[in-house]
Amino acid sequence: MAHKEKKERIERQAYWKKMEEEEAKEKEKQEKITAELNGFKNLFDTASRWHKSQYLRNYIAEFEKYAIKTNTLDNQKQRWISWAKEKADWYDPFIEKEVELLKEIDRETLERKKRW
């Protein structure tokens, strides 16, 4: 009887060890999937930001061309063009120019960064 109980205890221990190993493998797999997905989301978000910064630059260039064409490019519009170009550089993931008034703004969400 003692021999049988010892054998069953050893079998249970082996079973639980195997279960723990399988759970560890599954957890590791899920962590890799999560990391892969987060990496892809980051890639997609960065590409979207770059695309939007190019969209802004194209708009600014068209605005400037139109102002020149219509002979309405005054100091106010020139200041706005400089301001807008700076913001496009701030938003562009390749440049990320520092802009003092936007230091507390998250470039991804365009919301204030949360303070903890």
Image: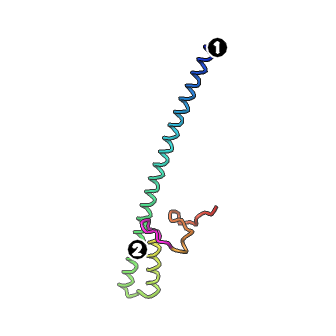
**Residue 2: image tag:** 1
Magenta stretch, main secondary structure, is loop
Residue 62 rendering spot, x and y as whole percentages: 38, 77
Left or right of 87, for residue 12: right
> Which color mode does the image show?
rainbow
* Tags 1 and 2 touching, CB below 8 Å: no
Residue 35 relative to residue 4: left or right: left
Q: Nearer the viewer, mark 1 or mark 2?
A: 1
- Secondary structure of residue under mark 2: helix
Q: Which is more N-terminal, label 2 or label 1?
A: 1
* Residue 28, position as x, y percentages in the image: 50, 41
Q: Nearer the viewer, residue 101 or 69?
A: 101
* Residue at image location 48% in from the left, 52% down from the top: 38
Give percent across and percent down for residue 115.
62, 63
Callout 1: 10 Å neighbours few (<14), some, many (20+)? few
Residue sitting farthest toward the top:
1
Whether 44 is drawn above or below 78: the answer is above
Residue drawn at (47%, 78%), measured in percent from left and top?
83
Q: Answer few, some or many: residues within 10 Å of disc 2's Cα (few below 14, many 20 plus, some between 14 and 19).
A: few
User: Which amino acid lies under the numbered mark 2 shown in the image of this protein?
Assistant: Tyr
Residue 67 forms part of the magenta stretch = no
Residue range of the region highlighted in magenta in the rendering:
90-98
CA gap, disc 1 to disc 2? Answer: 84 Å
Front residue (pair 35, 57): 35
**Residue type at tag 1:** Ala
Residue 59 is labelled as 2
Q: 61 or 23, which lies in front?
A: 23
Q: Is residue 93 magenta?
A: yes
Residue 20 quadrant: top right
Disc ID at residue 60: none
Q: Is residue 111 above or below residue 20?
A: below
Q: Quadrant of the N terminus?
A: top right
